[in-house]
Image (tube, rainbow, N blue to C red):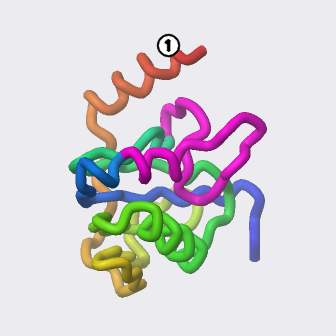
């Protein structure tokens, strides 16, 4: 059953080269009017979301920006992300439906390939206090 309020949390852990970072950032950031919106996009500050997640080293937990995304839809977006940033190496630990922190699948991005596999960890990590403060500050600055 597809429910409108179904949000999924994920934990992104990985790296990308300095040359590919701007390309990945361009892929993740949406334009006005939600142009370029997808399962891993950043369209503005969010207290619970992934926000502007690309970095040389990534380790971020948050909700996807939209409702009802499946594991396969996330994997498809990661194929596009790898095409934009070929040096992207990433593990995406996907929580269950309705922000359930129990991991239901791990998606691996490496060498331009994306594979969906069984969970490599049991639970998503919690958001740190530093991440929460950063999200509040960014939300206030962008308001």
Residue 143's place in the image compared with 86, above or below, is above
Residue ID for mark 1: 141
Identify the residue shown where x is 43% and y is 51%: 23
Residue nearer the viewer, 114 or 112: 112
Residue nearer the viewer, 92 or 8: 92
Identify the residue shown where x is 43% and y is 76%: 104
> Where does residue 26 sit, x and y in percent of width and height?
50, 46
Quadrant into which the C terminus falls? top right
Residue 39, by quadrant, is bottom right
Q: Residues within 10 Å of mark 1 (few under 14, many from 20)?
A: few
> Where does residue 64 sit, x and y in percent of width and height?
55, 53
Stretch of the chain drawn in magenta:
22-48
Residue 3's place in the image compared with 54, above or below, is below
Q: Secondary structure at mark 1?
A: helix
Identify the residue shown where x is 58% and y is 32%: 44
Taken as a whole, is the magenta stretch helix, strand or loop?
Answer: loop
> Where does residue 62 sit, x and y in percent of width and height?
44, 48
Residue 89, by quadrant, is bottom left
Identify the residue shown where x is 49% and y is 13%: 141
> Where does residue 120 sit, x and y in percent of width and height?
26, 78
Quadrant into which the N terminus falls? bottom right
Residue nearer the viewer, 143 or 123: 143
């Amino acid at each position: 059953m597809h429910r409108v309020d179904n949000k999924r949390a994920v934990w992104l852990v990985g790296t990308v080269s300095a040359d590919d970072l701007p390309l990945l950032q361009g892929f993740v950031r949406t334009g006005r009017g939600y142009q370029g919106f997808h399962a891993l996009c950043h369209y503005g500050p969010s207290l619970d979301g992934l926000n502007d997640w690309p970095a040389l080293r990534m380790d971020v937990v948050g909700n996807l920006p939209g409702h009802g995304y499946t594991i396969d839809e996330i994997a498809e977006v990661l194929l596009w992300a790898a095409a934009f940033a070929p040096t992207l190496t990433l593990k995406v630990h996907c929580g269950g439906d309705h922000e359930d922190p129990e991991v239901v699948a791990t998606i691996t991005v490496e060498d331009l390939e994306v594979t969906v596999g069984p969970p490599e960890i049991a639970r998503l990590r919690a958001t740190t206090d530093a991440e929460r403060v950063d999200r509040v500050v960014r939300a206030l600055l962008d308001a």
